[in-house]
Amino acid sequence: MTSQDPSFDWTISPTTADTFFAEHFEKKPLRVARNDPGYYADLLSFEDIDRVVTSMGLAVPEISVTRAGGNITPADYAYETGFIDPVRVNQLFADGATVILSGLHERLPKLARFCRALEAVFSARVQTNIYMTQAQSQGFKAHYDDHDVIVLQIAGTKEWRLYDTPIELPLASQGFDPGEIEVGEETERFLLQPGDMLYVPRGLAHDAVATGEPSLHITTGLMTRSWADVLVEAVNIMAHRDPMLRRSLPPGYANPGYDYGRHQAEFEEMLGRIASEAPLGKLMESFKQDFLTGRVPRVEGQMAQLARLKDLGIDSRVSARPHLIHDISHFAGEGIVRLVCQGAEIDLPEFAREPLEHAITARDIRVGDLPGELDDDGKLVLVRRLVREGLMVIL
């Protein structure tokens, strides 16, 4: 692997994607021990962290510093403006604190590529939190997360402990509260070494302690949508269609002794209407379009690509950018096809559909070899447009 081509299959190898989704996703943890310390080395290093912390002008909450005792506040490492003091951050780390960098995939292209690869698999936004923990230290006590995580151990080792699942697949509103939720008995303990991976489904309580040397790991958060989200939207759509759902609650329902049971049949009828008439296809399409249009471009080298357009010819070799997620719709009555990708909507004549479909997925192709009805000039126009939109690159 190189940092140019991360993939989900590579991330979980030798476990297959089929095995992961059948046996582990939202069900049980998966640990991959590789005995290959450099497996994830292209994604991140201590040198990357040093450069980011000391020279990129980070501010709270991009970075936070904590320890299991919880006695560190932003005032200990940041100015009143919110910008961090890199000297104090490093001092706290040297004294045993954990440094957490949130959203570093927005600053480091190699992490952005990794997140994009996983987004193409999960149809969900993917984010990273980077944890740098001093030897023999712990950032957080036992807790669970409200989203699934994939942990990549970069350097050092951490001892992980797994506990019970107090809430199965918790919603964001069911976040961990240490004062009210018991994590249960320890069920498993193991050491995560450099190059190892761990998948932890949301709701599974866990904690981790760095061992004999500083630890660096990437926690990848899978920000998936749930069927509850679809159902909420279904109720909203049906309420706009069906006056029965818009009727007021019965007068006096809040008075002592009111009999709610007499409305049970009516309530079940409303649920039945939602189940039978809510437009599932339209709902799923809406969620899909929301995901596609909210996926902002990541276009390394775009300035150089535009400069190369003047030399683009029919024999030039081009490629779609990796990990694009797109949708192509055909509007026959209007004579157009519409491409939705990376937040952009691009309308083209319908006769460009076949070469467009091929171009948006091609990995290495000669411009003149694009299939379809376009002549050479048309193929060049199409490729120029896609390069300008950041969807293709000239090789």
Image (cartoon, rainbow, N blue to C red):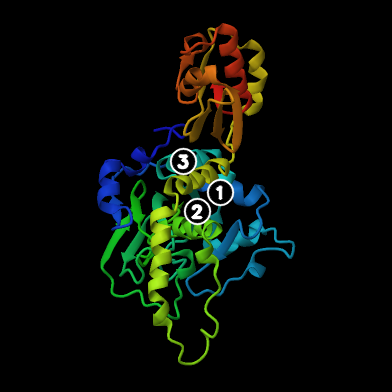
**Residue underneath mark 2:** 130
| Residue 25 rendering spot, x and y as whole percentages | 32, 52
Q: Look at label 3 and name its amino acid.
A: Phe
As drawn, is 379 to the left or to the right of 159?
right
Mark 2 or mark 3, earlier in chain: 3
| Residue 123 rendering spot, x and y as whole percentages | 44, 44
Q: Look at label 2 and name its amino acid.
A: Ile
Marks 3 and 1 in Cβ contact (< 8 Å): no
Q: Look at label 1 and name its amino acid.
A: Leu
Q: Nearer the viewer, residue 35 or 331?
A: 331
The CA span between labels 2 and 3 is 14 Å
Location of residue 9 (image quadrant): top left
Would you say residue 15 is visible in this rendering? no
Q: Nearer the viewer, residue 391 or 102?
A: 391
Q: Residue at x 37, y 65 (%)?
A: 203
Q: Which residue is drawn at 27% across and 42% down?
A: 18
Question: Where residue 114 is drawn, which disc sits there?
Answer: 3
Would you say residue 102 is visible in this rendering? yes
Marks 2 and 3 in Cβ contact (< 8 Å): no
Q: Which of 342 and 267 is in front in this view?
A: 267
Q: Which residue is drawn at 40% across and 80% down?
A: 262
Q: Which of 53 and 24 is in front in this view?
A: 24
As drawn, is 24 to the left or to the right of 364?
left
